[in-house]
Image (cartoon, coloured by chain):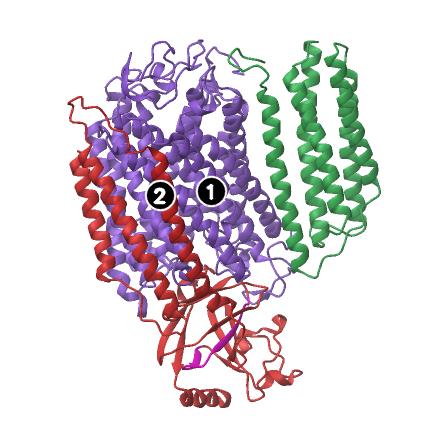
Amino acid sequence: MTSPTLAPGSSPARTGVWIGIAAITMSFTAYTSAMVVRQGSGADWHHVVLPGILYLDTVLLLLSSGTLELGRRRLRAGASGAMLLTVTLALGLLFLAGQLVAWRGLAAQGLYLSSNPASDFFYIFTALHGLHLIGGIAALGYLLGRLRADPAPPWSALEAVTLYWHFMGVLWLYLLVVLATRL
Amino acid sequence: MHESSAPPTSFLRKHVFSLDHKVIGKQYLDLALVAVVTGMVLSWLMRLHLAYPELAIPGLGRIAPNGAAGGVMTPELYLSIMTMHGTIMVFFVLTTAPFAGFGNYILPIQVGAEDMAFPRFNMMSFWVTCVAFLVLLAAFFVPEGPPLSGWTAYAPLSAIGKDAGPGQGTGQTLWAISIGIFCIGQLLGSLNFIATTLDLRARGMTLMRMPLSTWAWFITSVIGLIAFSVLLPACVLLVLDRVAGTSFFIPAGLVVSDRLQPHAGGSPLLWQHLFWFFGHPEVYIAILPGFGIVSHILPAFARKPLLGPKVAISCMAAIAFLSYTVWGHHMFLSGMNPLSATLFSVPTLIITIPATIMVLLWIGTVYGARMRFTTPALFCLGFVSVFVSGGISGFFLAQPSIDTYLHGTYFVVGHFHFVMGVAAMFGIFAATYFWFPKMYGRMMNETLGKWHFFLTLIGVYATFMPMHYLGLAGNIRRYSAFTDDYMKGSLPLHRFITMAALFTGAVQLLFFANLIWSRFRGAKAPANPWGATSLEWSIPSPPPHDNFGGKHPVVAHGPNEYGGTGPEGDHVMQATPESLGTV
Amino acid sequence: MGKLFAAIISAITAISAGVFIARIWWLPPDISVLGVGIDHQLMETMVAAGVLFVSSQLTLAFFAWRYADAGDGRPVKAFPGGATPMVALATLLVSAEILVLIVVGTKVWGGIFLAPIDPQALHIDVQAEQFAFYFRYPGPDGKLGVAHPELIDDGNGNFFGLDPANDTTARDDIVSASLNVPVGRPIYLTMHAKDVGHSFFVPELRLQQDFVPGLVIPLQFTATTVAKKEIVCTQLCGLGHFNMRAYLEVMPDSQFMQWLKDQANF
């Protein structure tokens, strides 16, 4: 992965993830400000009661960050971490499944994408976060494939994926706060 | 990070789905060329209709049977053409050519890298952009025709759907989807530019030794990363309003085409804020690469260093920062709080300071020079001239109290065509004449080039300067015809502008002829035909697949060492070993 | 080549500036109280911008002519003092000019858009729609009826969605397709849009303001001259945008009162 032209310590993959984080943060900032404006512009805002499963999902996602971090450290220490990475991937998929259950729950209340602005933003936030997480899951899958082919892990990719995954956790916490509180 | 140093062998991987930044750069430029021809033809149609509203344009009736029965354009077709002209030019020409096109080709070489940091993302960036262009063009072929809400797509006109008029159905949805896709492509591009500049620089290539062009592309990509991250959500919300029945931009109680709209609670100003938060920085995405290109090229033909390169970098950074504080100046009269107009006017006026300084640095560079008036040099000087002309009219529009009069008039049209249209185009022309020998290994024809320059210079002034006069006289924009009452007096001037626009367009045939002729018949280009200093001139023309032929350049000099004595003559190349170079 | 460039740039500069100076195309005469301030501000900017335009174009032309490579191996000359003094001077000058423009301009702007509503002003309700303006005057009761979007019926002339059956204040409202105002009296418009965004522009009033669906936007002006001028829509509003116009008629006070009476009887 490293080219002789690279300055020591520089990792394009990590830089790339940081840049991605900046862009994703910016776009969620835009959605949030749209939400604040929308909340103030009409009297039709009816707060959505969040399905309880979201809190379980939150625990799953935070747990997955932990298993990934442990796996990364084990690999760093020269031990095998593939198992922990697989667990992370599984937890990520479980999280997504949980989000789908949450959607069903909302739909059962009769709240759809266009029902009211609060539910609009609920679906938009969860869908976009889920899409970004799918990107992370794909990257984890790629990493696991690499690990199977070659026990020496691709370091910069591992670091980059871990960083991205943690960011997904932080982003979800932010979104949960935004959705749960009446901003 | 280069996937493999060995060049690909299959045709598909070599020319279509290539990972090579040079191929991708050329693909972007080809896309821009197709787009600019489309946009230019659309502008001719508009100009013809403005000058001769009753004119039957041969063939138009066949292409747009609903909008131009017998070839005479309807007012709504005029608006559709205007919308498509603006969208194509701003997104698919002014963003792709100077930034994605030349940036892709030149930036990695100028920092001494084998390729971009993420070649796969780079390839995706181009193909995603290409899809966006096709989706936009598809709007021409839907039954109701292309959208007519302008390139700014103000809600609720853009959000309501078919009720708002022809083209506001499927055409407008395609528009919003196309721009959303375009954002993704440009985000991938920006990501690559930033990572490459930060992480793939050759040994000795400190930030302060980077050529100004690379600096400009780098700063532009930072602007783009933020701007497109905001436009993308705006497009997502617009599409949802249109197809999913949400009401982000549509307030309650609208009666359109005698139908009470089933929406409530949205805010039309929200769209304007999101759009212009992207839209103003977009102006700098179009023009900053031009700043960099001129700052990089001018010294090579003045045979002396750029005046104040560090000042120039600071100015570009200041412009990038300020570009995010001025969006409200598009909305002085939009009904937002009038107090905020004064607040937005202050940074708008302040941004003229770094812009003025840039102009002075270029003029100061010409002072005492030994100017070689090649075509790229002429286009650099022309860039300075048109940028000054366009920038100065910004002085008027930055003031809310004057904008109160000029806001919806041709003054604005003249202003932005000079400052972001023509100036950016001059930057693109300068870059083309300058780097063509590197890209294709052949020189462009200088005689044709000079004719092209002088005739274009006269043509653009004849086209866009009179628009300022029209604007002062109160002639408003986005009207398809000026045939009655108070605007009738403007008709002769409109006809003059139309003639000038057709002339300017015809002159571009010289450019296309030159491109084609030089591509096959041009004189063979040496590695460094201009006696320039940056890394791309130390490798063969055209460069090998991995740019530096397996070697890793070591940089010992800044890009600006002209006007002394060195082993190569009056300049020192960046890759010249330290012991050899003195200026 | 440098000389040719210099000649063409100089010619372009001379012609461009000449047309401005000769005022061949210029603003129509101002007929409003606040227009004077705007015209003054515009003139001030015009002079400053003109000086900047001509001096920078001519300097560029002169340098291109003067510093062409003669092939004589003459050494290049650095700009006297380098970049710093020039940058400092330019920053100072431009900042000073900007400061003046901001101070003067804010006053003019404030006078139009931040002034409190004059209690003596004649209140007129304006509705913009695809592709017309409608103006509503309060009748003898001095009150405007409430507008209900769901009652809008253009076919029956109920452009504002009034409910005269239940709303007594709406019964005597006068609706007109032209904006008739008495000369010299402050006018207070409340502007709202029925469908999409529109704009109100009368060049002679030096006044332009968007209509935004969902918002009611106040606008004040006082016309100083009896005249008939066009109101144009300057916000792209759909296929008939080019045809969205109405008349502004500034009348002597007595004539205006008569007009109002005629409209009520109509």
Q: Is residue B247 above or below residue A71?
A: below
Q: Is residue B515 left or right of residue B11?
A: left
Q: Is residue B185 visible?
A: yes
User: What residue is shown with label 1?
Assistant: B282
Numbered disc in front, either 2 or 1: 2
Q: Chain of mark 1?
A: B
Q: CA distance from mark 2 to mark 1?
A: 30 Å
Element at badge 2? helix
Element at badge 1? helix
Q: Indicate which disc residue C89 carries.
A: 2
Q: Is residue B111 left or right of residue B176?
A: left
Chain C: drawing colour:
red
**Picture coordinates of residue C237, whole percent (x, y):** 47, 61
- Label 1 crowd (10 A; few <14 / some 14-19 / many >=20): many
Query: Quadrant where the N terminus of chain A lies?
Result: top right
Q: Of the residues shown, which amino acid type is indicated by label 1?
A: Glu
**Picture coordinates of residue C204, whole percent (x, y):** 36, 70
* Magenta stretch, residue numbers: C178-194
Q: Which chain is purple?
A: B
- Label 2 crowd (10 A; few <14 / some 14-19 / many >=20): few
The quadrant where residue A46 appears = bottom right
Q: Chain of mark 2?
A: C
**Picture coordinates of residue B580, whole percent (x, y):** 34, 10
**Which of the two residues, B305 or A169, is positioned nearer the viewer here?**
B305
**Which of the two residues, C98 or A24, is positioned nearer the viewer here?**
C98
Q: Is residue C194 left or right of residue A70?
A: left
Q: Which chain is green?
A: A
